[in-house]
Amino acid sequence: EAAMAKLYAAEVAMEVTTKAVQLHGGYGYIRDYDVERMMRDAKITEIYEGTSEVQRMVISGNLLK
């Protein structure tokens, strides 16, 4: 269940922050804006918690047991 939660949280965070950066246009990439930091944090969470592919393998391995 932890792998499912990590996967879901990381993917939703990236989806939301990507949309926020696009909404802000070029300003979304400027370090002076919080949205840029949030996107970096979301990407790091996606990598640090184990890549989405690894989380999917863990989930599928548990489902096959």
Image (cartoon, grey):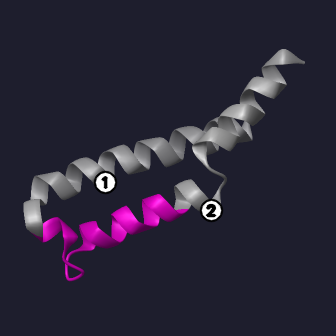
Instruction: Indicate the position of residue 14 as horizontal and vertical percent values.
Output: 39, 50
Q: Residue at x 11, y 60 (%)?
A: 24
Which residue lies under the disc numbered 1?
Answer: 17
> For the magenta stretch, what is the residue range?
27-44
Q: Residue at x 10, y 66 (%)?
A: 26
Quadrant in the rendering for residue 65: top right
Dot 2 crowding, Cα within 10 Å, few <14, some 14–19, many 20+ = few
* Magenta stretch holds residue 41: yes
Q: Compared to 17, does 3 lie above or below?
A: above
Taking the image as shown, residue 20 lies to the left or right of residue 8, namely left
* Magenta stretch holds residue 48: no
Residue type, numbered disc 2: Tyr
Considering depth in this image, is 8 or 57 the residue closer to the camera? 57
Instruction: Indicate the position of residue 57 as horizontal and vertical percent values.
Output: 73, 33
Q: Which residue is farthest right?
A: 65
Q: Compared to 5, does 33 lie above or below?
A: below
Q: What is the secondary structure assignment of the residue under circle 1?
A: helix
Q: What is the secondary structure assignment of the residue under circle 2?
A: helix
Q: Which mark is residue 48?
A: 2
Identify the main secondary structure in magenta. helix
Quadrant in the rendering for residue 25: bottom left
Taking the image as shown, residue 50 lies to the left or right of residue 40, namely right
Q: Residue at x 69, y 42 (%)?
A: 54
